[in-house]
Image (tube, rainbow, N blue to C red):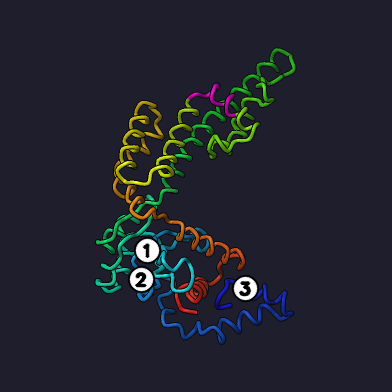
Amino acid sequence: MERFPVTCRTLEDFYHINGHTFEKQYKEVLSGFRQWDQLEHAEQWLLFPQNIGRRLAIDESSLSNGELYTFVTNRDAHTRECSLVAVVEGTKSEDVIAVLERIDEQQRDMVEEVTLDLSESMRKIVRAAFPKANRVIDRFHIQKLACDAVQELRIRHRWDAIDQGNQEREDAKQRGKEYTPFRYPNGDTRRELLIRSRYLLFKSADKWSKTQKQRAAILFEEYPDIKTAYSLCHSLRMIFSKNSQKDAARLSMAKWYNKVEEAGLHSFNVIARTFYQRYDEILNFYNNRSSNAMAESFNAKIKLFRANLRGVADRKFFLFRIAKLYAYPQ
């Protein structure tokens, strides 16, 4: 139980014991929970300065009922033992900074790089707590923002198609005729075309199946703005995939900005302005090609543990279990 996030209910199935009784025994006697040196403030913050390293990641995760906690992890520990540096209730920058400043300044100055998402609060935390570290905005959050803009456009057209279909059905009813929806050569109605195009817009064109290629051709002919948005999203993905040098990426990004300006799509103009404000932090990806994958992996483990427990009834004990797994040597 100290190495893997298993529950007492799981052991009940394997060893034919009373899981509820064993859970109480483990919590109160076997685990050392009541003697834990961070028990008093565990629900507000946890700190493990001995785990700090040169490369950190910062992200938020939900424990229960949408309650967010900020997690700082050591990327070099690869989400294993001694990878957890700090846990702070909430995402308010002042609260997180106050906890991280409990770490000796010399230790914090040793941090060379911190990966984070596009959150302004995370940016402020890193700038204040680790002033000498390079901030690297995760490339996948950037790409997700562009993908969301494409999907937003598709959904907007989908609602228009639903409204048009309802109007055509009502018109047919008033004329006393049977309603027959318009269908494209692949058999899709307007609404179906837009619904079934969701997943192909996430993929590169070279990974489309035969039916997806046919559907994409119809979609782009009917909705040229979706084609433009998809092209911008794909171009952004290629900037991170094909370029290996920061200077080359900077030139590619400048060309991408020009394409966005020419396209005149509101969502992408907003994205471009967001990127411009964080230009250097985005391009810092090319220093070591660092991403926030370790933080996302850590979040996934927490979610799995939470799911196995069917929710978090005791947050202090849950955080104790997380600390036993990822903050202390095994």
Q: Secondary structure at mark 1?
A: strand
**Which amino acid does the dot numbered 1 rest on?**
Leu
Where is residue 98, by image quadrant? bottom left
| Label 3 sits on residue | 7
Q: Residue at x 50, y 82 (%)?
A: 33
| Label 1 sits on residue | 56
Are dots 1 and 3 in contact, CB under 8 Å?
no
**Which amino acid does the dot numbered 3 rest on?**
Thr
- Separation of disc 1 and disc 3 at Cα? 29 Å
| Label 2 sits on residue | 52
Q: Residue at x 31, y 60 (%)?
A: 125
Main SS type for the magenta part? helix
**Which amino acid does the dot numbered 2 rest on?**
Ile
Question: Is any part of residue 121 visible from this angle?
Answer: no
Q: Bounds of the magenta span?
A: 216-224
Are dots 1 and 2 in contact, CB under 8 Å?
yes
Q: Residue at x 44, y 70 (%)?
A: 83
